[in-house]
Amino acid sequence: MLRRATFVHNSTRRRYSPYGRADRQWGHSESVQNLKKAEWDRVVQQHPVLGLIISGLLPHTFVGEPGFLQFFQSIKYNCLPTNFILSNLKTLHIISTGFVQDQLERVNNVALSCELWKTTTNKTYMTTTCHLIDDAWTQMSFVLETTPLPEAYTPKNVVVQLLKIAQKWKIKSKIKVVITNVDGIKREIKNCGWEYIPCFAHTLDVVFRATLEASSDWKELAQRCCCIAQYFSQNVEAQAQLKEAQTKLWLSPDNLIESNADRWLSTLKMLERITEQHKAIREVLISSNNDLFLTESENEDIKKAIACLKVFQGVMTAADTAKRYHLLSNVIPQVEDMKQKLSELELSGNEFAKELAESFIHFGEIKENDWLTLSTALDVRYRDNVLSDRVNLTCIKIKIRGEMLETRVSLRQPNNLDEALNRYLNKEILRRDWDPHAFWKFPKDEDWHLSEVARKYLTAVSTAMPADVAFDTEKASLVASRRSSLDPQHLNMMLFLNGNSFELSATKSREGEIYNLFEVLNI
């Protein structure tokens, strides 16, 4: 049995660590990682209900509810007591904590994302997630902690919590950048020696709100639409009349969508539904002598606003849709695409496009931000977005060369850095749907220092929360509801398990083989 275990480990021992030396500990560490993944899978496969609870963000007491018990009886599945479920969830928490700790120990650079969110009872929490690129150039994201904040929290409260989390996980010196949806926190983060990046999704909402605040006409129209949606949502009689009008006009029997007009995506969904149903809405409101109905001119203005907000939506859906988080390197190309398309709408007579474009000032001078420009320059899909200008090219090359010199380690002395950089700049641009990490996965020895700089900057993400939540109103609403329903005592554990289950669910090794380590090690 010992010989079998040795044979499995030998395939990893021959590989090199990021520091350029054959490392026996490296193969052992990877085997331990696979062991923890296998242990996670064993527990979840033995009790599938654990996977349902973790993925669905359900309270562990869910298994004791009458409807759930009845369902289990119907499929002849043995019901499990709630204390047993809780005990197994705690076991999985211990396993996953060890896995995350091991991953963090193996890298030199990480990025943090910090999301502030509120429960339905208006309590504020902060979820902190760590992002890294491992030795196989796989992007990984791990939820670290979810902590409550005081009702009247300040940026300092947030940073104090971040420092506690960094110290607990022993990553304070490894953190290079923090991405967050917290306003007014830039100075506090920089005082910790970290760089600050505002959440891209949050900034888009800031741009949208600023546009409404700058124009009383557009703000009033948005508020009218909110009142219309609210009226039909809260009035049972009006809902019934709307259904009758929809049937009469051969319209789909869809309910209106409510929004507070404080976020661009939820507002877009509301406006689209009102436009689809405007004939039925108008018929009901006129028959009931309600002055909320919209004129044809106002409906045309709504269509203009929809066209502009769909620019946001189109650019977002074209990004790394297969990934839970979008890379920071997407931001400059996305902002430029939006500006160009809004400019085209403005030329066609869309007044809202002009006012929305003016509010892009809230993004700041993005091409003067080192993290934004260097991450874009080292993403071979978007490299030329920041290097087409000769002045920018010279400046960015100087910065990248300086970063390459800082990667100096034993047995890997920098040599011909300019040649390595020029080789990269002469590479062909990749399509947008290709993975930029795969480009850097197997660097030649002479390109190693440049690849390590790329690893640092391509670790950063663009949003404080997963992109599939930030840019999907239905999923965001579901997550908000599920998080609010969790017992505060177990909230941190459940969000930790939910956020990290994806990274732990696969037992395949990086060579594509399956290691059944429990059998190999006779466990």
Image (cartoon, rainbow, N blue to C red):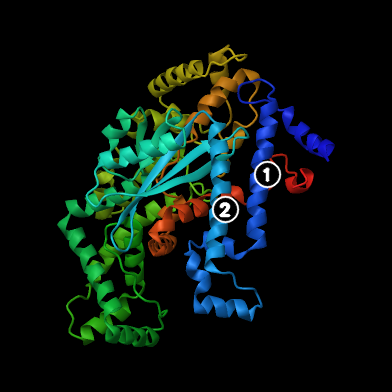
Question: Residue 99: x and y, percent?
Answer: 58, 42
Horizontally, residue 517 falls left or right of residue 91, namely right
Count every numbered label the image shows and give the total.
2
Kind of residue sitting beneath label 2: Thr
Question: Residue 333: x and y, percent?
Answer: 43, 39
Q: Residue at x 47, y 31 (%)?
A: 457
Horizontally, residue 28 falls left or right of residue 397, namely right
Nearest-to-viewer mark from 1 and 2: 2
Q: Quadrant of the N terminus?
A: top right
Residue 322 vs 233, above or below: the answer is above
Between 197 and 44, the one lying in front of the other is: 44
Kind of residue sitting beneath label 1: Leu
Find the distance from the CA under tag 1 to the CA under tag 2. 15 Å
Q: Residue at x 15, y 57 (%)?
A: 216
Between 135 and 504, the one lying in front of the other is: 504
Element on which disc 1 rests: helix
Q: Residue at x 28, y 84 (%)?
A: 238
Residue 122 vs 330, above or below: the answer is below
Q: Which residue has dot 1 on it? A: 35
Residue 297 appears in the rendering: no
Q: Residue at x 65, y 34 (%)?
A: 29
Q: Within 10 angstroms of label 1, few (less than 14), some, or many (20 or more) residues?
A: many
Q: Which residue has dot 2 on it? A: 91
Question: Residue 409: x and y, percent?
Answer: 56, 16
Residue 250 appears in the rendering: yes
Q: Quadrant of residue 70?
A: bottom right
Between 178 and 234, the one lying in front of the other is: 178
Horizontally, residue 491 falls left or right of residue 430, namely left
Residue 516 vs 197, above or below: the answer is below
Question: Residue 493: x and y, percent?
Answer: 47, 53
Q: Quadrant of residue 385?
A: top left
